[in-house]
């Protein structure tokens, strides 16, 4: 599968599939896909469809499916990353790297000291970044991305996770053993402004364990990526 160009489609019917919209434009104008080429199609279910392009039209192409298989690069561990909205394109960077590291779901939230914001266009941009990262790292299912207006809602969304980790500058040590994790794991990392004492207290009341990330001050995006990598390794995704 690694040598075939990969594209998302929501139009797989029987033995045929249709590629249109942005994925069609990318396939034809950037990847130079032509009739007779063999490609890999993804429907977001975790499956990979090997298909041969049979027809290229003005706004879409049709491909005949020859085989289908479950993607062996999809993570087994269930990791849910909650990150405060970051300035500039830093949230995009976190989404991209989280996808590569095997995160299955991403929540972006606003908090007391958060100075960035998210609107519908920015959320769609994040979903596009996730889809591109999914294709690049050979996954077949892009992480679901959700936006929360406040931290409380974001924390509530992780109630069903077996592990709930809250990275905070107030923590002098980690309350959870990051080397011995198992089960579904939620990770919370704040924006550039960090968290207030009240937000930290709220997380503790909701069962989140404080996580200490060392003596040095990390940028928010560094903290999110580093902690995600540590958790992914502990859960067996990088071994």
Image (spheres, grey):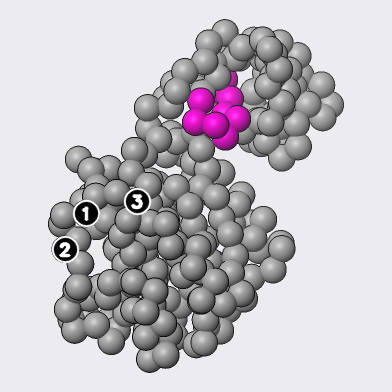
How packed is label 2: few (under 14 Cα within 10 Å), some, or many (20 or more)? few
Quadrant into which the N terminus falls: top left
Q: Which residue is mark 2?
A: 177
Q: Secondary structure at mark 2?
A: loop
Nearest the viewer among 163 and 64 is 163
Count of marks overlaid on the render:
3
Residue 150 can be seen in this image: yes
| Magenta-highlighted residues | 39-47
Nearest the viewer among 164 and 26 is 164
How packed is label 1: few (under 14 Cα within 10 Å), some, or many (20 or more)? some
Separation of marks 2 and 1 at Cα, in angstroms = 7 Å
Residue 7 can be seen in this image: no
Q: Which residue is mark 1?
A: 181
Q: Secondary structure at mark 1?
A: loop
- Position of 187 with respect to 122 (left or right) is left
Q: Which residue is mark 3?
A: 184
């Amino acid at each position: 599968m690694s040598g075939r160009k990969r594209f998302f489609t929501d139009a797989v019917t029987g033995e045929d599939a249709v590629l249109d919209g942005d994925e069609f434009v990318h396939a034809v104008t950037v990847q130079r896909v032509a009739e007779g080429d063999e490609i890999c199609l993804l429907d977001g279910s975790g499956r990979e469809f090997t298909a041969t392009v049979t027809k290229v039209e003005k706004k879409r192409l049709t491909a005949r499916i020859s085989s289908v298989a479950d993607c062996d690069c999809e993570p087994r561990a269930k990791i849910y990353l909650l990150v405060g909205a970051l300035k500039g394109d830093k949230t995009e960077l976190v989404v991209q790297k989280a996808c590569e590291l095997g995160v299955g779901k991403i929540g972006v939230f606003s908090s007391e000291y958060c100075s960035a914001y998210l609107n519908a266009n920015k959320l769609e941009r994040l979903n596009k970044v996730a889809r591109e990262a999914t294709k690049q790292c050979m996954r077949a299912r892009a992480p679901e991305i959700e936006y929360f207006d406040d931290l409380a809602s974001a924390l509530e969304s992780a109630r069903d996770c077996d592990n709930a980790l809250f990275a905070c500058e107030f923590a002098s040590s980690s309350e959870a053993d990051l080397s011995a994790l198992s089960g579904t794991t939620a990770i919370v990392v704040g924006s550039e402004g960090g968290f207030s004492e009240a937000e930290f207290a709220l997380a503790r009341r909701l069962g989140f364990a404080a996580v200490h990330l060392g003596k040095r001050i990390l940028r928010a995006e560094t903290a999110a990526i580093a902690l995600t990598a540590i958790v992914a390794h502990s859960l067996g995704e990088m071994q």
